[in-house]
Amino acid sequence: MELGISGKKALVCAASKGLGFSIARSLAEEGVRLFLCARDGESLARAAGVIEESCSQKVHYKSCDLLQISSRQELIAKVKEVFSGLDILVHNVGGPKTSTVLTTCASDWQEGFERLFQSTAHLNESFIPGMAAQGWGRIIAVTSLSVLEPIAGLAVSNALRSAVTAMFKTLSDEVAPFNITVNCLAPGSIATDRLDDLLSACTKKSGLTREQYMSQYLNTIPAGRLGTPEEFAAAALFLASEKASYITGSTICVDGGKRRSTY
Ligand code: NAD
């Protein structure tokens, strides 16, 4: 399928590994010009090098702590200097701390707000005017299945990713006349370091062996297995494409059927 995005310019956040890296690589394979960011400069440089080598194209990158306003400002300035504007903006960031609602203190809620909400609002406000002026844009946020089904122990993710989803739905109405689509992609259980850390903590708490815990866990997924980052990236690639021009304001789950609600 011709996706119609070769030569477009994309910023992919939190792209040194996991879901962000996989999305970046799949965009590059379609000829999209990339700017990557992540917190750790060394692993980011390595990730950019891997994509440069496999896709024979220059990959721009800058380390950025998306929680810090000044760091986001430096990233935005660099992207504008290198690309002048953007066609595709992929929001992603490392997951917040685990906690229950009752054990989340005010500073943890604030941290989650900066991490999950403010970082996306800031980048949107910086790049959407350029997309509107050119009459084309794709905005994709990596959220979580937790926006549809709260996950125990992930209070900050459950609450603030839901706020992001509502903000993005509102935004999608505002920018649809400019041919800009805005969608959320909700991963269920995709095999990355983040999921591995969460599963290790749950295994420890359960008192089961890893094998026993995983057997129970996989029973909750109709597909009977974890997803791969490449399977997740395929959905992001489609949403970023010209072909997805009539999909906006949606949350699409990539979860092997794990979501229990009909819609
Ligand atoms: P990961 O741990 O494999 O990768 C995280 C990435 O985020 C890395 O590139 C890291 O450098 C970057 N990062 C972390 N903190 C940052 C910061 N402050 N500023 C900039 N970059 C930062 O995680 P992943 O599995 O790829 O998850 C990506 C997002 O999706 C996370 O928010 C995670 O909670 C969410 N998620 C993942 C799953 C899953 O199944 N993997 C499920 C639900 C939600």
Image: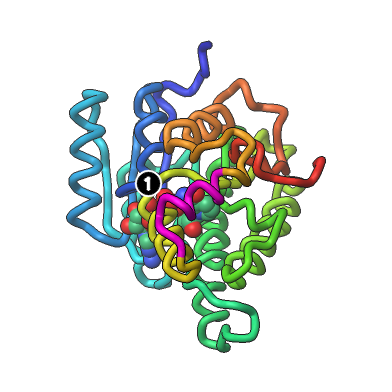
Q: Residue at x 50, y 29 (%)?
A: 234
Q: Position of residue 163 (x, y in %)?
A: 68, 64
Q: Residue at x 39, y 60 (%)?
A: 197
| Residue bounds of the magenta highlight | 208-218
Quadrant location of ligand 1?
bottom left
In the image, residue 212 lies in the stretch drawn in magenta? yes
Instruction: Decide if residue 183 is on the left or right side of residue 38.
Output: right
Please state, as top left, top right, bottom left or bottom right, where the C terminus lies in the image. Answer: top right
Callout count: 1
Q: Position of residue 220 (x, y in %)?
A: 63, 46
Which secondary structure, mark 1? helix
> Which color mode does the image show?
rainbow
Q: Residue at x 39, y 54 (%)?
A: 196
Residue type (three-letter) at the residue carrying disc 1: Gly
Instruction: Decide if residue 195 is on the left or right side of residue 55.
Output: right
In the image, residue 93 sits, relative to residue 156, either above or below, namely above
Residue 109: which quarter of the image? bottom right
Q: Residue at x 42, y 44 (%)?
A: 191
Q: Which residue is mark 1?
A: 18
**Would you say residue 177 is visible in this rendering?**
yes
